[in-house]
Image (cartoon, rainbow, N blue to C red):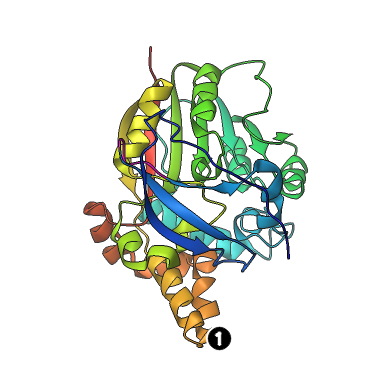
Amino acid sequence: MINIAMEDVGCPLECVRADEVVLTGTDQLHGLPGAFTVVRCRSCGLMRTNPRPVPSAMDLYYPDDYGPHLGTRVPANRIRKRHFAELRTTAKRILEFNSTRLPIMPVGRMLEIGCAAGSFMHEMATKGWQVQGVEVSPAAAADAASLGHTVHVGTLEDAPAPSEAFDLIVGWMVLEHLHQPMLALKKLKEWAKPGGWLVLSVPNAGSWDFRVFRDKWYALDLPRHLYHYTTTTLGLMLAKAGWQADRIYFHRVLVDPIASFGYILRDMGMKRVGRKLIRFPEHALYWNCALFPLGAAAAAMGQTGRMTIWARKAP
């Protein structure tokens, strides 16, 4: 039996310790050991995984086949993948999914936290941006660096200060993974130029997906997700760190309920169908286009399982 070192932590907003248990779950995605409890701070409402694995124990939960790392590789054979790239470009031009939506701004310096294998960073570089990345996975960081980009291998918390401030800082589904999100947000404020933008996407724990699927919610992703944000608690975190929230976009996709239903079918013994649905988010572009009207309607009500927030560095 694997012994996992755990730690007990309080609310990062420094509230008086008074938590209520929300649920207890396991690693649904990879089936790795451990049971993990999600608690809610009674003062501010922020949910967190507690107790949680210490940082040095987290490598176990990010295996080499971790989907977000594999899904951000830039294909070596671009000709073979050209039809897919053209479809993605066309879909982005016609449909706005809000998954990587950015403010309209001049080209400048960009930092991507949790850049994984570097596909987004590389795309921005082709548009003229000066890009840098931070990535905790050595294998994924090596893929990004092989594209010619500067990548700090390690956590954001231990990353050195840049030589020059950034106009734009992005993080796609990263903040929920960080052990010290408040420290990270304050650090990013120091690294941003006056009026610089911070664009973050996180799972939306205020969605109906979470209320319905609970520990089987695909975007819960225990124990890799250490914090579980709503629009309110994410706004509180940003404000305390010195950022001014500008707007929130809910993603116009329905990948999470479909994958969550896959967990349920798998546990009911329908393993083949369940596994296909669980992998749905990795290959969902065609279906995202087909389901766009439903996804857009759910997003308009703030009820999809993912959201992107824009914030600016406060004076």
Tell me the quadrant of the picture where the C terminus can be found: top left
- Identify residue type, mark 1: Arg
Q: Which residues are magenta?
A: 43-47
Percent position (x, y) of residue 88? 50, 58
On the rendered structure, is 293 left or right of 194?
Answer: left
Instruction: Report the residue at 55% width, 86% height from top.
Output: 272
Q: Is residue 49 visible?
A: yes
Query: Does 76 sit above or below residue 10?
Result: below
Instruction: Report the residue at 36% width, 70% height from top.
Output: 290
On the rendered structure, is 303 left or right of 86?
Answer: left
Percent position (x, y) of residue 225? 52, 50
Q: Which residue is mark 1?
A: 272
Q: Quadrant of residue 217?
A: bottom left
The answer to whether residue 249 is magenta is no
Q: Is residue 97 visible?
A: no
User: Quick one: label 1, few (<14), some, or many (20+) residues within 10 Å?
Assistant: few
On the rendered structure, is 209 left or right of 159?
Answer: left
Instruction: Report the residue at 56% width, 63% height from top.
Output: 27
